[in-house]
Image: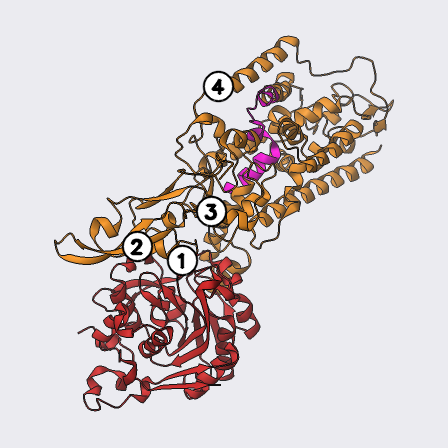
Amino acid sequence: MNSRQGRRLQRLRILSQFLFLVLFFYLLVRLAEGGATRPSWAGFFFYIDPLFLWLGLLVRPFLRVFLLALVPLLLTLILGRFFCGWVCPFGALHQFFTWLGPRPPKKAAVERPELRLKYLLLIVLLTASLFSVQLLGWLDPIALLTRSGATVILPGANALLQRALEAGPEPLYALGRRLLLFVSQRTSIQAIAIGSIFLVLLLLNLRRRRFFCNTLCPLGALYGVLAKFSLLRLAVNDACVKCNACAGHCTFYGSPYKDYMKSECVLCCNCLADCPTAAIDLRFGLPGRGRRPAIDLGRRRLLGAAGLGLVAAALPLSSPERKARVRSFLRPPGALAEEDFLEKCLRCGACMQACPTNALQPAVLQAGLEGLWTPVLVPASGYCEYECHRCTQVCPTRALARLTLEEKKQFKIGTAVIDRSSCYTYADGYNCAVCEEHCPVPEKAIRFREVEVANFRGRLKKVKQIYVVPDLCIGCGICETVCPRTDAPAIRVGAEEEQRGNPAG
Amino acid sequence: MVASSAILLPLAARGENQATAPARPVQAGAVVQVKGNSPYEATQRAIAELGGMGKIVSRGDVVMVKPNIGWNRSVEQAACTNPEVLRAVIELAYAAGAKNVVVMDNTCHRAEDCYQRSGIAAAARKAGAELRFCDENRLALHDFRGEYLGKWPVYRDHLEVDKFINVPVLKHHGSSGLTIAMKNLYGILGGNRGKLHRDMGENIAELAAGFRSHLVVVDAWRVLMRNGPVGGRLSDVEERRTVIASTHIMHADVAAAVLFGRDARELEFLQAAHARRMGEIDIARIALKSLTA
């Protein structure tokens, strides 16, 4: 293949990456848009992720839509790691930052220990998942990008754009606000943590090409294992003058004539474009028997990684959070009982992106280290909108059960309690009832009774004192969100009587 | 006396002038109440009976039409202003020569949901009005010059228009008893509005006294009788098929309260308004023209 054809393939690859990246963010933004329609397409990238097919096989019931992941799996057996090079939206970002990075050094070299790490990580995560501890979502590129997009990239972009427009003239600002900005700015309690990790991962590309993909990505590792046996390969013909130009831009610092490793090649086609003598061809053929350069994991490392996986599983299993009877946080509506939930939740943040009120937030350590980045409902940030069930519709694994709107309206997320030592109607002896006003339950789960009390001046006064009807309360949290106290809300929702642990509920 | 200069009411409606004509109802504070076949026609008729939109909107005016879009509830649930009433008002304003009609509200639920579900967005667009969302950057301190309510942040959009038309829905409200036109003005406010639920009656009165509504059109087509202001249950809604119009905000509220079945004298916010001499609290002393179309 001559370099013109090579360049054409290379450009086609870049175009494909760009389009998939755009598609990814289009679907992500669509998750947040209003309306009752179920964005079934929004889960596209999850459904074609074989790691999630694996997780799906470990839990009941099995969701058949994840069988879509067989398509890229089978295609990988034919083409190799085309997904990493041509489809993966996170890979596209890494490719872009790699391109931004410094020009290649004269003598590039394959660093096997770095390439090896991702396989070991995959083994750790897969081993842990066998014991119901499911941490793949922390590193899976689709979950990682969804989570970062929902909590940092989109809100951050919105905030920057808002500031930029504010600096401009008023009509431009008004137009921009209407066309480009979200009506309300979202915030995330983990924006700094998740954003920093994301930024570091991108910046690491400036040191090593596609660092995340080559070194950490468990999905890339899975595809790498399969790509070893793929039919398509790069073949060097007699025209090769061993100039090593092909190594110049190789995504994993290999070169087809010396260090070609099918498991690492993402078909970026840079070598095809760089070869001055048209010495590299794409060929189909059965995987050869001869010894080829390969990543050698070694028995000891394999066993070590598996052992580490056991530890990764043992630690959360021997921690109290899974079985805790008392919980300090709320889960979104439809959340399964905690153990099932943790096993199914991908920590992807799709629910957070879908939540119109910014109520769903990534957990820090409330749910244990295992529960890092799982969704919690934080009324201080937003309430569960009575007329909405989007989070339950978009959860790719149904860790949030797919509730109809009517079911969701009945689903008890928790129960509100009043803090009489700070509620204005008790502590200060004056009327308020903002929570009562907002309570969406038609029969009103928050009510007031008029009583005569002595206020802080000692005068007798009629006050409408607030109380909660626990059996009617669904725990949506709007009362806590709107409580006008600015130190701490005088009414708050706790996990008391939450429905999810109680199937009979 | 509450800063009287801020009470932007027709002079004749004010208490001090009533000493000269105690028994006669005051024309400038007249109220028209129309029971009709459709909310759209009833609105047209009520405004026509009041003397027409031409008396309120001048050629070239920028007009704010402020409905109640507080909640993510459907038209049938009657928690927001009927979109057909709104559409009629917008169209009449344009017909009277308005340059631009703006529709906005500071909602309680998420604004996009409320605008959509209430049917207000569709109606406003159909009538050619500009639909705006509240923007924190456009808050300005407005002095209501009240005893309870002094300076408070208001969305500038409401201060920058030539005419302000208040188009509330009549419904039950837990803490204030009813919410009509005076309470509807909470929707022009920013800031921690929840704080204004203390001494709510006084605040509502001073809000209405310190900010002028050039015209009030009360939607009482479907009325949420219980569990307001958000409601939700259709069994709590009654069809009253009525629209009330007046240039006098307090009188419109008194008439609407009576229509609801409440004695206006029992409602704290009307008591507070009466104490501030904003108008009559006794429906018998208000020029009420009630007709069935």
Position of residue B80 in the picture relative to residue A149 (left or right): left
The 10 Å Cα crowd at callout 4, few under 14, some 14 to 19, many 20 or more, is few
Q: Position of residue B142 (x, y in %)?
A: 30, 66
Label 4 to label 3: alpha-carbon separation = 32 Å
From this viewpoint, is residue A438 visible? yes
Do circles 1 and 4 both sit on a common chain? no
Q: Between label 1 and label 4, give the one nearer the viewer.
A: 4
Chain identity for the colour red used in the image: B
Mark 1 in CB contact with mark 2 (< 8 angstroms): no
Chain for numbered disc 3:
A
Q: Which residue is mark 4?
A: A315
Sooner in the amino-acid sequence: mark 4 or mark 3? 4
Q: Magenta part mainly helix, strand or loop?
A: helix
Q: Which residue is mark 2?
A: A448
**Residue occupied by mark 3:** A358
Q: Quadrant of the N terminus of chain A?
A: top right
Distance between mark 4 and mark 2 Cα atoms: 47 Å
Snapshot quadrant of residue A401: top right
Discs 1 and 2 carry the same chain letter: no
Sooner in the amino-acid sequence: mark 3 or mark 2: 3
A128 falls in the magenta region = yes
Q: How many marks?
A: 4
* Chain A painted colour: orange
Q: In this picture, which residue range is highlighted in magenta?
A: A126-151
